[in-house]
Image (cartoon, rainbow, N blue to C red):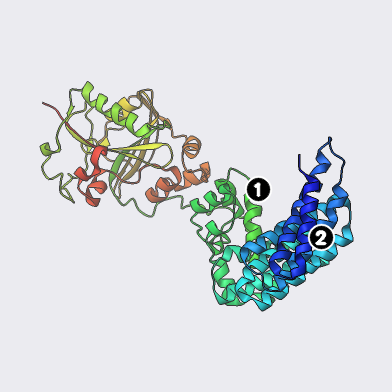
Amino acid sequence: MTDLSGLERRVAADRASTRSQRPEDYLKLAGSLTELAQALLTTRDNPSERDRTAEALEPAQEAVAIRLHWLVGGFVSYEYAGALQDALRLFEQATKLVGHRQLATNTIRSACSAYRQVAQDYPDVSAMCADGLSKCGVWLMRLDHEAAVAATESAVRIRAAMYARSSEQPGKYLASLSTLLRTMMVGRSRKQAIASYRALYSELTSPASTAKLRETRIEDLDLTLKTTQALNKLGAPTLERAGRLTQQQILYQSGGDLATIDEINWRLALVGLKPLAAGAMPEPPSRPVEISATYGAIAVRCTAPDALMQVRTAIIAAFARDGAEQVDAGRFAGVHEKHWGVKEPVVNPATELGADVVLVEKSSGSWISVKSLNWEIGGLGTHPLAVRLSEKWPVLTVATIENISYELCLYDNGVATQYAALGRPSGQAPLDAPLAPLDFATLADYGADYASETQVRAAFGNAEMFAKVTELPGSGIRQAAENRPLTEYGPDILFFGKS
């Protein structure tokens, strides 16, 4: 239990010490008064004590008055400003509980005047004064709306001048602008508030400062994690770039959360940019201009945390079933060199695995890409490695042959089930049984979370776009060998030999 009598005696002793007129003694008295006011407020929630909440108002007000007097007198350290804010917060709490609305309004107005004076007399602490004015504006919201707008406007003016001198801490300036706009919206329509805000913003912010503000990184905008992640995925690193997106794109990335659009639109309004257009993502071309690169790869859908290790183990087991064991890279001459001479691709109709080089990599999303050298392009519906891996996971083979064909084949439970293609290499044996058309809706669900079935279907045949929206492999082992020697892929590259 707090010793209120002891606190009252300490206040009396500290008050007597102020006869020296030294500022240190006055500030000590302010500290004691704050402690006494805090203790008196706690009696409200203590049934064992008499409720003395009303008595807290006088010491709380006196503590604020003392600290404001010495703030204007030159006590402008950030530590002192923090103590003043604590005293003001306690006073605001006391007036709210007791009900002295006018007293609270007049005292907080006095604090605003003090902050304005200090910002003018001591430019080095302008930032501290701007923070204090913003906080006073928040407190005045329920007391005097005009005074609240004036306080937040003063904070913005200080921040604007600071930002014009040195374009650092754009987040601080944007935060003060946000407080001003929210304050202006009280009791007005959104349209009226934004019109008034824009007029003031144009007066205070130069075109050069506006341009810099619009280049603020999204990490400095105090956005929620979901909104930040959506903007990162959409390649919008700045506020300016975010304004070029559409609502539809943001909704795709945020799982339909409308709050993300409101967050972004609010920041755009702060710097005079229009809200996000409704729009939709532009549809990719429905047919490729040309089928350029030749490659083949297998995509294995595995969602386990150790998916890469599981697929790697399954590949080793699949080759072992046909008597092919892991061997040293030395069995493959030249594999340690960049631009290793990968043979021209041919359709390999063999259904039994043998000597091979296999690259296993984590693709995007839940796909693991498997790139084989000797079965780069397997026989349609009979790719031996795809058949083996599909016994455990859904598997999709991707095969492109330059200027000739673009093929996808889905394997499940050890057999080929679905197929889609543009063109087809000549000389392939006909299938024993026709395959069902590829289900693009399922492929859209598996792929990038912003792509619809229509967009996936439209992108089919354009290898680069299709790989982007489905997150399937967009290259094969020949492209990997051109990037760097295959031996440098470490544990991701597997070499198999057969005696």
Q: Mark 1 points at which residue?
A: 258
* In the foreground, 430 or 166: 166
Q: How far apart are marks 1 and 2 (CA)?
A: 44 Å
Q: Where is residue 6 in the image (x, y as percent from the top left)?
A: 77, 48
Residue shown at the point (73%, 65%) measured from the top left: 26
How crowded pointer 2 is (Cα within 10 Å; few <14, some 14-19, many 20+) is rated as: many
Q: In which quarter of the image is the N terminus?
A: top right
* Mark 1 or 2, nearer chain start: 2
Per the rendering, the mark at residue 163 is: none
Marks 1 and 2 in Cβ contact (< 8 Å):
no
Q: Which residue matches tag 2?
A: 61
The image position of residue 322, as x and y in percent, is 20, 23
Amino acid at circle 1? Leu
Identify the residue at horizontal 53%, vertical 66% (top origin).
215
- Left or right: residue 79 versus residue 32 is left
Residue 412 horizontal side relative to residue 196, left or right: left
Residue located 81% across and 60% down the image: 61
Amino acid at dot 2: Gln
- Crowding near pointer 1: few (<14 within 10 Å), some, many (20+)? few
Report the number of numbered marks.
Answer: 2
Determine if residue 381 is in view: no
Describe residue 164's horizontal placement relative to residue 360 as left or right: right
**Residue 237 shows in the view:** yes
Name the residue nearer the viewer: 292 or 492.
492
Callout 1: SS: helix
Q: Which of 357 and 421 is in front in this view?
A: 357
Q: Which residue is drawn at 76% across and 66% down?
A: 18
397 relative to 201, above or below: above
Where disc 2 sits, the SS reads: helix
Is residue 357 shown above or below 313?
A: below
